[in-house]
Image: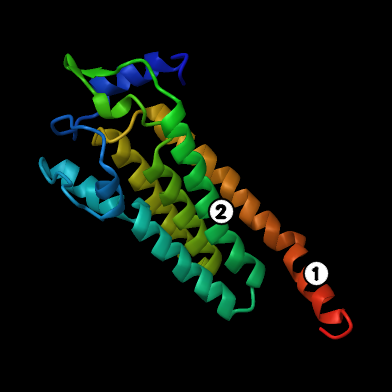
């Protein structure tokens, strides 16, 4: 990303694939990142729709949704999954923050205006957390898988059309989410946490 290997795609998208985008803004502050919809733009209409559809990918909202899924999994005695999904969310979000503070792309422009917020926007945290939320909720409530897949697809498309992120940002967020989700699923399927708990119970005096 820092080398600008995919800048051509991002430059093209910034000019031609953001029909719903509003006025370019600055990167969000820490407070704006933590408080849902704080100072969020709601004009034009496409931006407002994108803000609402992608809201489950906001830091606090996504954490609450993953914790809700974790609680449901714990109640069904899927303890490993209940632990793995919040851990996957936390680890992926930490990796996102590290990348955001270490990688800088060549500047992108839309109609001659420098998109300052895109200078250090890889990977997309909203794409990352929307995908993890969808996966965690699907693990807890499998009947919702189709609806969650449709919502995730809509969120990803709107992140681009509304000019919230460049294509490589979105791809990076989805890739990181895929790794985190695969790890969460792998932890449950391995039975590692269950075996450790069984060993502790089997110890004399435990």
Quadrant position of residue 21: top left
Residue shown at 42%/60% (left/top)?
63
Identify the element where label 2 is drawn.
helix
Q: Residues within 10 Å of mark 2 (few under 14, many from 20)?
A: many
Identify the element where label 1 is drawn.
helix
Measured as percent of width and height from the top left, residue 73 is found at: 56, 73
Q: Which residue is mark 2?
A: 88
Residue shown at 47%/33% (left/top)?
99
Residue 174, relative to residue 84: is it above or below? Answer: above
The colour style of the image is rainbow
Residue 4, relative to residue 200: is it above or below? Answer: above
Measured as percent of width and height from the top left, residue 108 is found at: 29, 18
Q: Which residue is mark 1?
A: 195
Q: Nearer the viewer, residue 206 or 85?
A: 206
Residue shown at 39%/16% (left/top)?
7
Indicate the quadrant containing the C terminus: top left, top right, bottom left or bottom right.
bottom right
Q: CA distance from mark 1 to mark 2?
A: 20 Å
Measured as percent of width and height from the top left, residue 100 is found at: 42, 33
């Amino acid at each position: 990303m820092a080398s600008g290997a995919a800048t051509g795609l991002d430059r093209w998208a910034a000019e031609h694939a953001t029909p719903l985008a509003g006025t370019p803004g600055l990167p969000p502050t820490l407070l704006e990142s933590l408080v849902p919809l704080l100072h969020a733009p709601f004009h034009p209409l496409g931006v407002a729709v994108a803000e609402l559809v992608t809201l489950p990918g906001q830091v606090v909202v996504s954490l609450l949704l993953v914790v809700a899924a974790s609680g449901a999994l714990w109640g069904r005695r899927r303890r490993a999954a209940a632990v793995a999904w919040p851990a996957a969310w936390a680890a992926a979000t930490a990796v996102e923050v590290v990348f955001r503070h270490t990688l800088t792309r060549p500047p992108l422009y839309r109609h001659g205006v420098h998109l300052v917020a895109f200078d250090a926007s890889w990977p997309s945290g909203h794409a990352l957390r929307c995908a993890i939320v969808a996966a965690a909720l699907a693990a807890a409530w499998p009947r919702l898988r189709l609806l969650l897949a449709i919502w995730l697809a809509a969120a990803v498309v709107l992140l681009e059309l509304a000019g919230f992120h460049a294509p490589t940002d979105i791809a990076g967020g989805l890739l990181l989410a895929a790794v985190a989700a695969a790890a969460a699923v792998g932890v449950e399927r391995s039975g590692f946490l269950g075996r450790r708990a069984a060993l502790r119970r089997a110890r004399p005096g435990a």
